[in-house]
Image (cartoon, grey):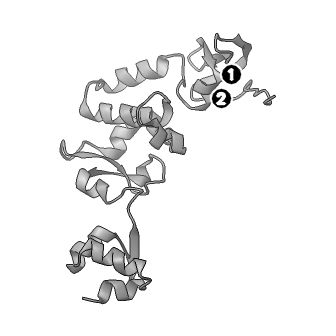
Amino acid sequence: MPKRINLAGQTFGRLTVIKSVGKDKDSKTIWECLCVCGQTKLVITNRLRRGITQSCGCLYTDSHKKHGRSHSPLYRVWSQMKGRCTNPKHPKYASYGGRSITVCDRWLDFSNFAQDMGERPSPQHSIDRIDNNGNYSPENCRWATSVVQAGNKRTNRFLTYQNKTLTLKQWADELSLSKAKIRQRLERGWDIERTLTTP
């Protein structure tokens, strides 16, 4: 039998857990929480631990009052970013939250996100994590086009030569070699220098 989790006394966003008050219809523990605004709210364990519920609702209200941009393209980017990381029902959750990729605490507030990232340079740009295994944070994110992001996929193979790291395709373009030829050479056991310097 799994060990019962006791969240009493812990803080999640604006909520501090007071006590367990029973279980819901799916046998999930319900916690009574006190929000910093003074209101109480009942929340199940998973929604607290995954950062899905962080206030009684006042955080959402304050955020909207503060920036008034809930229908802007930038807000949609922010909302989708959070959903991918925190909502198991999001279609892309498995590739983000399911891989333990999170949104940093600072960016849980839209105003901070907008301040750090600025507006999208164009409709072709979307948010991109420089380290594809890293979290969403100011130091790991940039605006990038789909072409740039394609070179940052987890499935790409990277080669480092003379302190320069590129994907196979990027090396092929730079050296006027075919991607297939580079791959074949590596599969034959050639070292990286010979692979990239042989015409």
Q: Amino acid at mark 2?
A: Thr
Residue at image position (32%, 83%) is 196
Front one among 192 and 55:
192
Q: Is residue 144 above or below residue 196?
A: above
Q: Quadrant of residue 124?
A: top left
Residue at image position (31%, 31%) is 76
Residue annotated with mark 1? 17
Image coordinates of residue 51 in percent, x first then y, are 55, 31
Residue at image position (72%, 26%) is 7
| Figure quadrant of the C terminus | bottom left
Residue annotated with mark 2? 11
Image coordinates of residue 55 in percent, x first then y, are 54, 21
In the displayed structure image, the side of residue 57 where residue 18 appears, left or right: right
In the displayed structure image, the side of residue 130 where residue 180 appears, left or right: left
Residue 156 numbered mark, or none? none
Label 2: which secondary element:
strand
Q: Amino acid at mark 1?
A: Val
Q: Quadrant of residue 18?
A: top right
Number of other residues with Cα within 10 Å of mark 2, as a class: few under 14, some 14 to 19, many 20 or more = some
Q: Is residue 179 above or below residue 194?
A: above
Front one among 67 and 120:
120
